[in-house]
Image (spheres, rainbow, N blue to C red):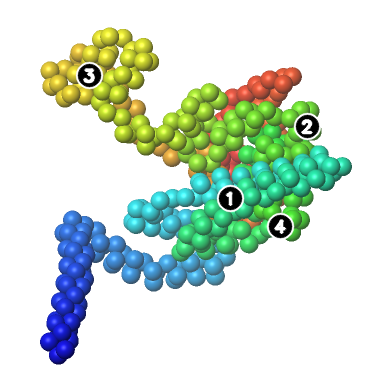
Amino acid sequence: MEIEKRELEIEQNKFNLAKNECEIKERIEKLQDVENEFDLNGPDIIRRAISKKFQSGMVGTIEDELKQGKDMNSLQRYRYERHVYEQDLEAKEDRLADFLDVETRLREIAQREICLIEQYKYDPEKLEDELKTTTKEYKRFEHEWRMIRQSFDGPLERAFDYWRSNPKWYMHRVLRDDCARMGGCCGRDCGCCLRRRPDQTDRRTVGHCTVECGCCKEARGFELSEDDKEYFAMRYAVSEDGNKGLDLKDLQLKSLGMQNQHLQQALTKEAMKEDLIRYEFSDGAVEEFERYIFEDDTIDDDEAEFTDDECPPVEEEDPYYRRICLASIWGLVDGNFEDPFDLIDEAPICDPTWQFVGNKLVAQEENDSVMSETVW
């Protein structure tokens, strides 16, 4: 009996030793990863740590001085520059464009619900079914809005809270002009945008017109088709992938291509060659491509159909994204140094940048250059 007890203790000790050995190995592997990371990026890690330590004390002092001087434009500009600096320093993903597009999507749903209430006011059962669908969709986008909003911190959060503390922030001149140029109510004297209030419903309705605005529908005289709604939603997306200059067919093809990008990356070289043949490339082009993918060094620049000189340049920041983002998040305009709150007033009557002839959409030339104080 005593021997069995001793054997059991020995087995238990062996198990504990094996467990401790595994834990120690895991810790060693983690330490090795840290060591490798430091060997590769040690100077950058030290630089970021010192910079953050030094700048954290300076930021509060400078912001306090600007507040005391009541120079709110400079305060917001300083916060913007700090945000851009920290984004570059930490190599963080900038999701402000996604945030603004989600806000637009929330307004679309809220404005669609207003139209549904009017459309089915004599059919409560149908209205209830429609509102159930929109409510689910709204909650999904609202959750995404909250997730992105919770990621705001530092200068970005302070600037955002300051600007959005004014319930009329969305009546900024840049945003009013953008609404009018898209054919929204700021281009007419109805005053719909001005009358929107955050306390009217439990929806985030504050903001300008979308493709679901009922007043815009009445002004046009007909309902937009789903294709037209998709066209406008993608063309006027704040995100830089909006590709506003492409036609609807190209936009739809690009959207499908993005959804299947992970599948395209998994194609083999032979599959890529077959795709070229299927899309009716010339025999010479297929032969050239085959030589290229199998790393045939005999092909020179003169013989090749495409050269490095013909590669497209690196894309710069989308001026539309910059203009709308500056106004919506910071209350700023490039080239303007007024107090951001002084740029909030009633919407002017402007001509839209597009019109409908019958039921056909006719786009006019649009200027996406950055607005400045000389425009006003």
Give residue 249's position: percent from left, percent from top: 53, 23
Q: Residue at x 82, y 41 (%)?
A: 120
Residue 14, picture quadrant: bottom left
Quadrant of the rendering where the C terminus is positioned: top right
Residue type marked 1: Phe
Q: Nearer the viewer, residue 331 or 288?
A: 288
Let me know if residue 180 appears in the view: no
Give residue 124's position: percent from left, percent from top: 83, 46
Residue at image mark 4: 202
Q: Earlier in the sequence, mark 3 or mark 4?
A: 4
Q: Residue at x 67, y 50 (%)?
A: 135
Q: Are marks 2 and 1 in contact (CB under 8 Å)?
A: no
Give residue 3's position: percent from left, percent from top: 12, 87
> Considering only vertical position in the picture, is 141 above or below 48?
above
Q: Earlier in the sequence, mark 2 or mark 1?
A: 1
Q: Earlier in the sequence, mark 3 or mark 1?
A: 1
Residue type marked 3: Glu
Q: CA distance from mark 4 to mark 1?
A: 14 Å
Q: CA distance from mark 4 to mark 2?
A: 27 Å
Residue at image mark 3: 290
> Considering only vertical position in the picture, is 270 above or below 92?
above
Q: Earlier in the sequence, mark 4 or mark 2?
A: 4
Q: Residue at the right extreme?
A: 122
Residue at image mark 1: 141
Q: Nearer the viewer, residue 127 or 100?
A: 127
Q: Earlier in the sequence, mark 4 or mark 1?
A: 1
Q: Residue at x 18, y 24 (%)?
A: 294
